[in-house]
Amino acid sequence: MTARNGATARLIDGNALSLKLRAGFADRAHHLAERGVRPGLAVILVGENPASAVYVRNKVAACEKAGIRSLRFDYPASIEPTEVFAQIEALNADPSVHGILVQLPLPPQFNSEAVLDAISPDKDVDGFHAQNVGLLAQGTPAFVPCTPYGVMKMLESENVPIKGAEAVVVGRSNIVGKPMGRLLLQAGATITVCHSQTRDLAFHTRRADILVAAIGRPRMITGDMIKPGGVVIDVGINRLPAEQGGKLCGDVDFESARQVASLITPVPGGVGPMTITMLLANTLESAERFAGRFSAWGSE
Ligand code: NDP
């Protein structure tokens, strides 16, 4: 591993940046309230996955603090998909709801793509509807998926140069890796997206000016896989087994990575809070668009 003159990386603090951004949201919610609009987010949770339950609880709590009304719909894992589709249809038609989110993963009887595509693209604050995926790929997004959106805000907050940078994303999921690659490409980086079939992962990661790890494997990216002075964004959230302390950790081995990188995100307190922050941002944006349309019609 190449040490950077004994210095350790500076942290990109997702909690602090979230607080800063959320302070601005209160004003936006207030402006909407003056126009008689309270932003509303509907969250659908199917099954008893403990991690999903925590994510949903955190999202709902963040909404309340930001002046966004949240509606929660909890279903048992055995629910018939038709019931969930009917609920989505009702929410699509409800003018007090500006965002609809279905927490993933869904139980096996569900076709997740079909569920995501049932959400009105205008209320798809996760940005997972095929139409919104297409718009993002085209470079004209309507809703940017929250986790990669949060990562872009973190890079922006630190003035990390993206144009011309070598950006390497490890992971190609629809919710993180692929949209992350698209956003970095759109911002002018030269991108490489790695996955489980990538030959010689370290060859790619060592070239990265910006390295984003979204793998779901605890501490897989070690310091010797990082370019000296590179920026490391750790999206992973993994719970270590009880015999290893049961704590949360990322996909990056933080201790060895911070000896090599110039900037690094911690886990917890990095990308996680930013994901929720950008969900709030997308919900507000959606409510503002609805309010704008409503006043445009009203003035005709
Ligand atoms: P997925 O399981 O959907 O995708 C994981 C990706 O990692 C896949 O593309 C897979 O490749 C790739 N991968 C797996 N093993 C390797 C390997 N050995 N070498 C290279 N690539 C590999 O996960 P998600 O994208 O949903 O999530 C990734 C991580 O981010 C998880 O820890 C998750 O908990 C976390 N997360 C955090 C969020 C936050 O707010 N901070 C939000 C969302 C997720 P392949 O496609 O070939 O299988």
Image (cartoon, rainbow, N blue to C red):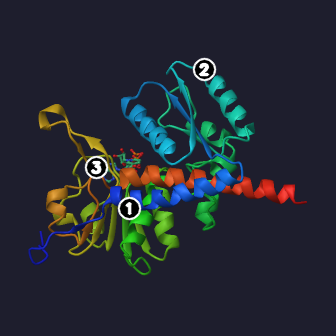
Left or right, 89 with reference to 113: right
Judged from the image, the secondary structure of the residue bearing numbered disc 1 is: helix
Q: Quadrant of residue 111?
A: top right
Tag 1: amino acid: Leu
> Mark 1 or mark 3, which is nearer to you?
1
Q: Residue furthest front?
A: 34
Image quadrant holding the N terminus, namely bottom left
Q: Is residue 172 visible?
A: no
Left or right, 242 with reference to 176: left
Q: Residue 65's spot in the image, x, y percent? A: 47, 45
Left or right, 25 with reference to 219: right
Image quadrant holding the C terminus, namely bottom right
> Mark 3 or mark 2, which is nearer to you?
3
Tag 2: amino acid: Glu
* Front position in the image: 64 or 47: 64
Q: For the residues marked 1 and 3, what is the alpha-carbon distance in whole angstroms?
A: 14 Å
Report which residue position mark 1 lands on: 17
Report which residue position mark 3 lands on: 268
Judged from the image, the secondary structure of the residue bearing numbered disc 2 is: loop
Q: Residue 28's spot in the image, x, y percent? A: 59, 58
Tell me if label 3 and label 2 are in contact, CB under 8 Å: no
Tag 3: amino acid: Pro
Residue at coordinates 85% horizontally, 56% vertically from top-left?
A: 297
Label 1 or label 3, whichever comes before in sequence order: 1
Report which residue position mark 2 lands on: 80
Label 3 or label 2, whichever comes before in sequence order: 2
Residue at coordinates 53% horizontally, 71% vertically from top-left?
A: 186
Q: Quadrant of residue 73?
A: top right
